[in-house]
Image: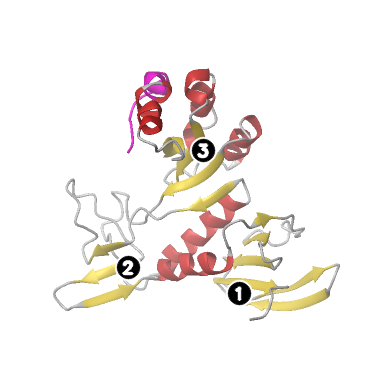
């Protein structure tokens, strides 16, 4: 459920009927998130909500959309975390083909959209995001149905007339991260010469099974060679193909 309006207009709802009704129904374990909008409103929006003690005690996280990320720096996420470290940050909505200047809402097999997913996921993870959710799991070939005609692309496209289902490139980006980053994984520092490789995005995690996962996204049109070094185990040389998403995992227990 989403409640629109300025944060001050919602405080009575947060501190009163909604959260109390959940508790009365035995659903007090449900985590409530604030904002559920673009990060351009951070950190002030959350500051306003958390300044009200009656509302703050019911808030567990901050829900963020990705739509203005192309002109809003991730510093907004850092500031939100530094001011409210007890709150998790979750990317709760994202899709492609949403802009008016994108007449083709669904583009089958279009890998640049998968790359944009990967870039945003990595950026978010590097700035305190704990997860990333697509707005739609599956849509039809026109990017619907949608009652306000807000058609967009999706990881899975259903062609009902042909009885076919298409896995879009975005599906494989989401599958890549979902398979490797287990719940409970903890981000760790990865030193990288970003001055020389501005189009190489990266993130690193230690999983609950003690495996280490390092993910690289090469947004350049040429291959890049990387030497990955773990001071405990040694080094690995890796060649990244142009426009590729690559993960390296080591230390996982064998079945």
Q: Which residue is mark 3?
A: 61
Give the SS element for disc 1: loop
Res. 52 in view: no
Q: Going from the N terminus, do you reach mark 2 or mark 1 first?
A: 2
Q: Are marks 1 and 3 in contact (CB under 8 Å)?
A: no
Labels 1, 3: front one? 3
Q: Residue furthest bottom?
A: 255
Residue 98 position in % (x across, y down): 32, 51
Residue 156: give its label: 2
Nearest the viewer among 149 and 2 is 2
Q: Which residue is mark 1?
A: 222
Q: Residue at x 18, y 78 (%)?
A: 163
The reply, left or right, for residue 3 in relation to residue 215 is: left
Residue 47: give its label: none
Q: Quadrant of residue 182?
A: bottom right
Res. 237 in view: yes
The reply, left or right, for residue 232 in relation to residue 95 is: right
Distance in Å between CA atoms under marks 3 and 2: 28 Å
What's drawn in magenta, residue-wise?
Answer: 1-13
Distance in Å between CA atoms under marks 2 and 1: 29 Å
Colouring style:
secondary structure
């Amino acid at each position: 459920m989403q409640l629109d309006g300025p944060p001050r207009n919602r405080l009575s709802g947060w501190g009163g009927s909604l959260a109390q009704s959940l508790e009365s129904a035995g659903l007090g374990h449900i985590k409530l998130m604030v904002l559920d909008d673009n990060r351009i409103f951070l950190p002030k929006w959350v500051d306003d909500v958390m300044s009200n003690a009656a509302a703050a005690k019911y808030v567990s996280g901050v829900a963020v959309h990705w739509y203005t990320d192309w002109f809003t720096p991730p510093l907004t996420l850092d500031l939100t975390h530094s001011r409210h470290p007890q709150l998790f940050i979750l990317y709760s909505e994202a899709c492609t083909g949403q802009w008016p200047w994108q007449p083709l809402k669904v583009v089958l097999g279009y890998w640049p959209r998968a790359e944009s997913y990967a870039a945003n996921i990595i950026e978010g993870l590097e700035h305190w995001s704990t997860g990333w959710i697509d707005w739609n799991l599956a849509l039809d070939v026109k990017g619907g149905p949608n009652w306000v005609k807000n058609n967009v692309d999706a990881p899975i496209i259903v062609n009902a007339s042909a009885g076919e289902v298409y896995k879009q490139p975005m599906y494989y980006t989401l599958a890549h991260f979902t398979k490797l980053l287990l719940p409970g994984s903890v981000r760790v520092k990865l030193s990288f010469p970003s001055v020389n490789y501005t189009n190489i995005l990266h993130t690193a995690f230690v999983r609950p099974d003690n495996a280490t996962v390092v993910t690289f996204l090469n947004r350049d049109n040429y291959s890049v060679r990387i030497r990955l070094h773990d001071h405990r185990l040694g080094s690995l040389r890796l060649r990244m193909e142009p426009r590729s998403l690559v993960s390296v995992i080591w230390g996982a227990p064998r079945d």
